[in-house]
Image (tube, grey):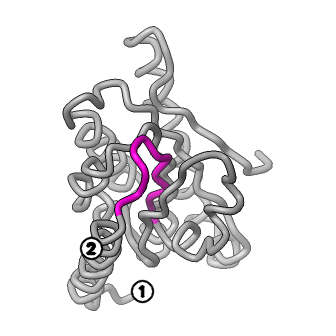
Amino acid sequence: LKLAFLPLFSRLMLAAGRRTFARLAARPPPADAVAFVGSSTFTYWAALAEDMAGLPAVNAAFGGSLTAHVLAHADRIAALRPRVVVYYCGTNDVTFAQRARAAFENFVATADALRAAPGARRLPIVYLANIASPFQRGAGAERVARVREINRLVRAFADAEAAANGAYLTHVVDVNDE
């Protein structure tokens, strides 16, 4: 897989993120909403508000993003002052041959940046585990192994965080049949 296009792709994704947050700034979400952040799995969730009826929710995702792109917009996510962040990102990292450890480290850095915001020290983050989709499985065992490794690393991080804090701040939801 040739990755020479990644610098251009990253510029496009960062711009997509800026557009998403400009749209949200023009029509601010309710205070203490649940912020859904990450890649296209959330971006194209057109019925998010209806599906979360009774729960203030904001879609702050931008399709195609890598974990580094979400990290780059952590300050904008924090500015939404969410009561919970639901995070789904990492499958694009795997698709573009990024290391599982790099995707994990970007997630941790994002969590740290969000929790560094005023009043957000114990911000709950729900990490939706990356799925080994038919697309990923069709690309081979090595790619599926990277998906599983990202999830394993985040799960270990959440467990260690819970041990240190006396409570889970990062909650892992894994729908994979493993």
> Which is more toward the observer, 97 or 155?
155
Q: Residue 128: give x, y in percent of width and height.
A: 58, 49
Vertical placement of 150 versus 9: above or below? above
In screen coordinates, is 3 left or right of 53?
left
> Which is more toward the observer, 120 or 167?
120
Q: Residue 59: give x, y in percent of width and height.
A: 48, 63
Report, in whole angstroms, how far the alpha carbon at label 1 lies from the one at label 2.
Answer: 33 Å
**Disc 1 and disc 2 in contact, CB within 8 angstroms:** no
The circle on residue 22 is 2
Q: Is residue 41 magenta?
A: no
Q: Earlier in the sequence, mark 1 or mark 2?
A: 1
Work out which quarter of the rendered image holds the N terminus and state it: bottom left
**Identity, as a three-letter code, of the amino acid under mark 2:** Ala
> Which is more toward the observer, 106 or 123?
123
Q: Residue at x 73, y 74 (%)?
A: 134
Q: Residue furthest top?
A: 166
Q: Nearer the viewer, mark 1 or mark 2?
A: 2
Vertical placement of 158 versus 87: above or below? above
In screen coordinates, is 33 left or right of 171?
left
- Which quadrant of the figure has residue 161? top left
Crowding at dot 1, Cα within 10 Å, few <14 / some 14-19 / many 20+, comes out as few
Q: Which residues are magenta?
A: 28-38
Q: Residue 27: give x, y in percent of width and height.
A: 36, 68
Q: Residue at x 80, y 49 (%)?
A: 177
**Identity, as a three-letter code, of the amino acid under mark 1:** Leu
Could you say whether the residue bearing mark 1 is in a helix, strand or loop? loop
- Which quadrant of the figure has residue 97? bottom left
Pointer 1 residue: 1
Q: Residue at x 28, y 26 (%)?
A: 121
Work out which quarter of the rendered image holds the C terminus and state it: top right
